[in-house]
Amino acid sequence: MAKYDFFIAGRWRNKDNIKPVLNTIRASGKTAYCFIENEYKGEALSFPIENQETIEASMQASELMPRDHPMIRKIFENDISAERDADNFIVVFPAGLNAHIEAGVAYGMGKKCYAIGRPDKTETLYCIFDQIFPDLKSLENWLKAA
């Protein structure tokens, strides 16, 4: 049995759209892992969810870190472990490169893949998504019916 019903992917810079998705999934009685809850306090970088300026500075700093930095490895291990432990994957658009890679990983793991929001453009590989919900209300209705 999976530890989570959903793994939520997206980008820190889009956290204001991710938090309502997390809340909607949990309000439906489902469990979810979401990277925005990992603040990493006391680490090389922290991502305090309520402080957009600090998050932006941390994002810029993390993008300059070498791939083999222990902090980068820790974030990777936390996220990939949770992705393995989830039944379903959902990405919140707009999403960055990491979230798109995570979508491919989830699909390769045989997870049901979903997206919410409007992508910037059509990508052929978006066919991996079982459904793309245009808005939060559509996701909420689907969760109620599921």
Image: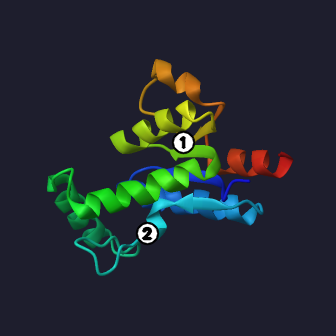
Q: Secondary structure at mark 2?
A: loop
Q: Position of residue 138 (x, y in %)?
A: 70, 44
Q: Position of residue 114 (x, y in %)?
A: 61, 38
Q: Amino acid at mark 1?
A: Gly
Question: Would residue 88 be found to the left or right of residue 120 on screen?
Answer: right
Task: Using the image as rendered, state which of residue 3 and residue 102 is in the foreground.
Answer: 3
Task: Using the image as rendered, state which of residue 101 and residue 109 is in the foreground.
Answer: 109
In the rendered image of this protein, does residue 96 appear above or below residue 82? above
Which is closer to the viewer, label 1 or label 2?
A: 2
Dot 1 and dot 2 residues touching (CB under 8 Å): no
User: How far, Cα to Cα, is label 1 from label 2?
Assistant: 23 Å
Residue pointed to by mark 2: 38
Q: Position of residue 111 (x, y in %)?
A: 63, 38
Q: Amino acid at mark 2?
A: Asn
Q: Quadrant of residue 45?
A: bottom left
User: Residue lying farthest top?
Assistant: 124
Task: Using the image as rendered, state which of residue 34 and residue 22 is in the foreground.
Answer: 34
